[in-house]
């Protein structure tokens, strides 16, 4: 997302704040003029330190299967409480979680596996043609 945004709308990079516990990721982002906060996204102290309450848009880009000690449902619920006017985009592992996340406050849902499937289909169409 950061790379694409840097190409198409670099002025928006200064509006991004990333929370991560990987210092190498934060260092790389800082080199692209993206602010970062070191911490655990499941920690209220980290969310307070990152001023999540002032966020206009909140993205949770990590699927539940990779999150430790939390999940997107909990993150959406917490973020909706501390940032009631923010647009929240959450990642789901499967379609059966979409309604539950929306009920907890997610405005939009990102299903990475659906995106990957669509992208792979376009690659196959490109190689073999749509009519083969």
Image (tube, rainbow, N blue to C red):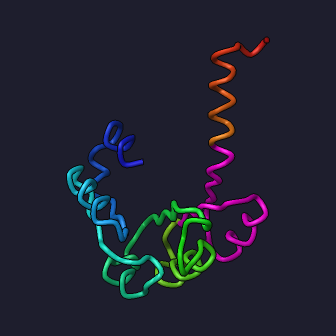
Frontmost residue, 113 versus 85: 113
Vertical position of residue 66 compared to residue 53: above or below: above
Q: Residue at x 33, y 59 (%)?
A: 16
The outermost residue toward the bottom is 45
Nearest the camera: 3 or 23? 23
User: Splitting the image into 4 quarters, where does residue 7 fall?
Assistant: top left
Q: Whole-percent x and y of residue 112?
A: 62, 50
| The quarter of the displayed image where residue 128 is located | top right
Q: Residue at x 41, y 78 (%)?
A: 40
**Residue 1 location, x and y as percent?**
42, 48
Q: Is residue 112 magenta?
A: yes
Residue at x-position 61% and y-position 64%: 107
Residue 96: x, y in percent? 79, 63
Q: How many marks?
A: 0
> Which residue appears at 72% of the width and 64% of the height?
98
- Of residues 42 and 104, the one nearer the viewer is 42
Residue 86 point in image, percent of width and height = 49, 70
Image quadrant of residue 109? bottom right
Figure check: 124 above or below 19: above
Q: Is residue 101 magenta?
A: yes
- Residue 16 appears left or right of 88: left
| Magenta stretch bounds | 88-115
Instruction: Classify 113 as above or below 77.
Output: above
Q: Quadrant of the C terminus?
A: top right
């Amino acid at each position: 997302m950061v790379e694409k945004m840097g190409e198409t709308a670099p002025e928006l990079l200064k509006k991004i704040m990333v929370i991560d516990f990987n210092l190498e990721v934060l260092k790389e982002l800082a080199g692209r003029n993206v602010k970062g906060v070191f911490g655990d996204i499941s920690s209220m102290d980290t969310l307070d330190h990152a001023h999540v309450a002032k966020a206009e848009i909140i993205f949770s880009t990590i699927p539940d299967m990779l999150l430790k000690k939390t999940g997107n449902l909990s993150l959406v619920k917490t973020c909706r409480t501390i940032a009631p006017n923010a647009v929240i985009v959450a990642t789901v592992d499967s379609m059966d979680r979409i309604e539950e996340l929306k009920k907890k406050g997610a405005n939009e849902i990102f299903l990475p596996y659906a995106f990957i499937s669509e992208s792979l289909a376009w690659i196959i169409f490109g190689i073999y043609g749509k009519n083969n």
